[in-house]
Structure formats: C-alpha cells, structure tokens
Image: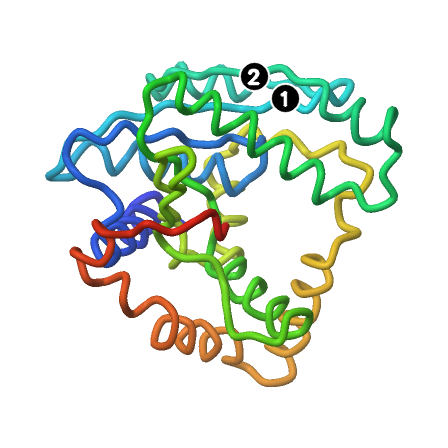
Amino acid sequence: MKLQQLLSFTRRAVDDYHMIEAGDRIAVGISGGKDSLTMLYALHGLRRFYPFPFELEAITVNLGFPDFNLDGIRELCRELNVHYTVIDTDIYDIVFQVRKESNPCALCAKMRKGALNQAIKESGCNKVAYAHHKDDVVETMLLSLIFEGRFHTFAPVTYLDRMDLTVIRPLMYVDETDVVGFQNKYELPVCKSPCPADGHTKREYAKKLLHQLNQEHPGTKERMFRAVLDSIYKPYKDLEYVRNLNIKNLC
C-alpha cells in the first residue's frame, strides 16, 4: 500500500466519524509494532493538508523488557518532526517476575493504559489515536459474540470521562494486509514485541478464526465489517452525537 492510499483511508475515517477538530493535540501511542508506526505516518501526512490544524505527540510506554531498542523509532520521529516521549516503567517485572501472572494480558494492558493516559494528560493532549485497523474491529466483534454473547466492538470515537480524553481510531478502514504492505514498502523500524505471551491470546484465536472463515467463504470479513458499520457505528456519523459523547471507558 502506498502512502497516498493510506492517507485516503485515514481521511475517510476521520471525516466520517468527526475524529479531528481544529486545535486538537493528538497523542499517538507507539507500541513499536507495524500498526502504530503506520498510524504515525498517516496522521503526519494528514496534518500537512487537513483543513483543521492539529498537533501530534508520539508516546511509548516502555514496559521494561530487556533489549527493547527504540532507536529506530526515535530516528523516525526526528525525520517526521514529531516530538517523541518514552515513559519507562517496571510493568514487565511486576507482571511476570513479581506477580507471575498466569494470564498476564489484562493486568499488563490496564497498567500500560494507565501509564499512557497519564503521560498524555501531562503532555497537554486532548485526544489519543489508537492503531486499531479493520481486522481488529471484526476480531473484537467475534470475541464479543463468542465469549460475551453480544454484538459489540470498540467505537470509532470513545470519550473517557475520568481522564477527559477522547480516543480516536483513524485506521479503522485499513486492512491488516495493507498495513503489512506499507511496513514493507516504507521499511518501518518495527520493534518486535518481546512479550512471552505474544501470539498466545484470545485475540490471536479470533485472528486465526477470521482468516479461516474468509478463506472458506471469501468476503466474510467485509460482510462482517459492513454489519458493524450499519449496526454499531451508524450514530457516530452524527457530529452532535460525537460532541455529546459521555461514555465510560469501553475500549
């Protein structure tokens, strides 16, 4: 996928769901993976021509894994002229060494999100961009159906009332395969996750299930995504609805 196509998908999502307004200061949570780095490129490119001026701040929560080298990301942020902050934490030691969690993902995610949100507020940002793409939307819906018995996924725009912070998801129209293509074409400095639980989660199960369904019944993912757009996301196209959001943390 070329940058122009990425920018087209991003602008469509931003416009459809009123994600950005003039004067926004948007934090980009950089995990080191392909998704967050692609989103950084997308918002940096969008900022150059979008009619509503906005600012960007890149933030990484360093969980404390050994040999997690962020030099490539630092250099990328310098090239893009985006201020980059790394928040060092002991989350890895707490989750894996001290508490020795058998199911570490929930605690890790909670601690990581707390550290990220605090850093975002300290940086003066009013919004944070999460790098969830189209596959994430559908996989989350599958997980909700299978394990919760409801038709649900995360929203394109979510207001966190306790933090007075708005979450946006500008990559929601982008397929994961296109993110992979973008990563390869532009040689993004991806830092592979050293987490021992990586690839052994319920989300990985949903990813494999979606891939199997789409292979056996071509077009399944697109039909599922269309169902989400028509049944869950439709109200978010109303600007007044988005402005009046007062939703507790559902992401």
- Mark 1: few/some/many CA within 10 Å (<14, 14-19, 20+): many
Relative horizontal placement of residue 197, taking residue 122 as reference (left or right): right
Query: What residue lies at 17% left-to-right and 29% top-to-bottom?
Result: 23
Q: How many marks?
A: 2
Q: Residue 89's x, y, as percent? A: 66, 18
| Mark 2 secondary-structure assignment | strand
- In the picture of the structure, the residue carrying the numbered disc 1 is 62
Q: Residue 192's x, y, as percent? A: 68, 34
Query: What residue lies at 27% left-to-right and 27% top-to-bottom?
Result: 25
The residue type indicated by label 1 comes to Asn
Q: Residue 128's x, y, as percent? A: 39, 35
Disc number for residue 170: none
Vertical arrangement, residue 165 with respect to residue 148, above or below? above
CB-based contact (under 8 Å), mark 2 and mark 1: yes
Q: 73 or 244, which is in the foreground?
A: 244
Relative horizontal placement of residue 105, taking residue 55 as reference (left or right): right
Disc number for residue 87: 2
